Amino acid sequence: MAKVVTFGELMMRIQPADYYRFVQADTMTTTFGGSEANVAVSLANFGHDSCYVSKLPSHEIGQAALNSLRRYGVNTSFILRGGERLGIYFNERGASQRPSKCIYDRKGSSIQTAMPDEFDWKKILAGASWLHLSGITPALGDNMIQACKDAVSEAKKNNIPVSFDINYRSKLWSREKAGEVLSELCRNVDVCISNEEDAYDVFGIKSEGSDTETGNLNNDGYLYVAKALKEKFGFKKVAVTLRSSHDANRNTWQALLYSDQNDFAFSRSYELYVVDRLGGGDSFSAGLIHSLLKGMNTKDAVEWATAASALKHSIIGDVNLVSEAEVSSLAHGNATGRIQR
């Protein structure tokens, strides 16, 4: 299988058990996750040489975070050690009409304070078949903006395809700064992954006639978004994920993959009972990378990626712990959830 490199921040997730609120919980559980790390775990589960790049503190908590990736077969040899701390986020699971809530405590983390020249991208990307980044990493600071630029530049020198998930986080940076930085980065990206909110927040590209709160999704509007993104940046492919939330537990999930006006496809639409929605977009990114590396056509690729992300919503934690065979089964229509014996 292919060597795929992802780059970002790995964080500790602290969460009350079950559906307890922060103010009533006596104990909390810890797991680890982060957008690009979640992609790396999925790709390792699909059989790829999945290499994750980051920086973690040298103490035992940093080691625990590192071990959380190793247990799933992720190549951690390019993770730097040092710095003061591991970023944390607290998650409270929503239910019914009460939404989930995330509180971040990541300022001064090891990756946030790392310097661009600490990452030897020539060595890291040697033999790679793909590089994946998201908009979260450059949002961590000017040093990470430069590190992402260096990674993309080295990938382009070696004709390594680059995918980029817009992943706008308003708590990390402004729309204006995100638009400025990501506009420059995206000009060297091959595959863009976005949703309707990020396309509008960062680039001002809006899907007319859609309302994700009411569940009114206008496919023509999403085609417009994909086409506008491609025309603006010259992407080879644009993927747009389409989510409508009926409540915290019931979502509709679909996606579009667009190459040009003669080569695009929408996936089937899934009605999801959400166990844990965090990492849903990351599992789509991993599924799309896998399907494109396998040479699937547009329709099969978007079906496969959407099936992978649909399954993620049934799994507690950030990472998508499903196999290639399980995703293929759902992508080919086996959606009954009947017990396997």
Image: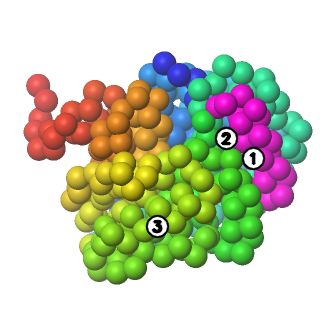
Where does the image place residue 96, in percent across and percent down from the top left?
Answer: 28, 72
Task: Please say if the residues under marks 2 and 1 sit with CB atoms less than 8 Å apart.
Answer: yes
| Mark 2 residue element | strand
| Dominant SS in magenta | helix
Q: Position of residue 247 (x, y in %)?
A: 29, 72
Residue 74 falls in image quadrant: top right
**Residue matched to label 1:** 148
Would residue 180 be seen by someone viewing this image from the given angle?
yes
Identified by mark 3, the residue type is: Val
What mark, if any, has residue 225 been given in the picture? 3
Q: Are marks 2 and 3 in contact (CB under 8 Å)?
A: no
Residue under label 2: 7
Q: Give the mark nearest the N terminus, 1 or 3.
A: 1
Q: Residues within 10 Å of mark 2 (few under 14, many from 20)?
A: many
**Mark positioned earlier in the residue sequence (2 or 3):** 2
Out of 291 and 173, give the one closest to the viewer: 291
What segment carries the magenta color? 135-160
Residue 45 higher or lower than 145, as above or below:
above
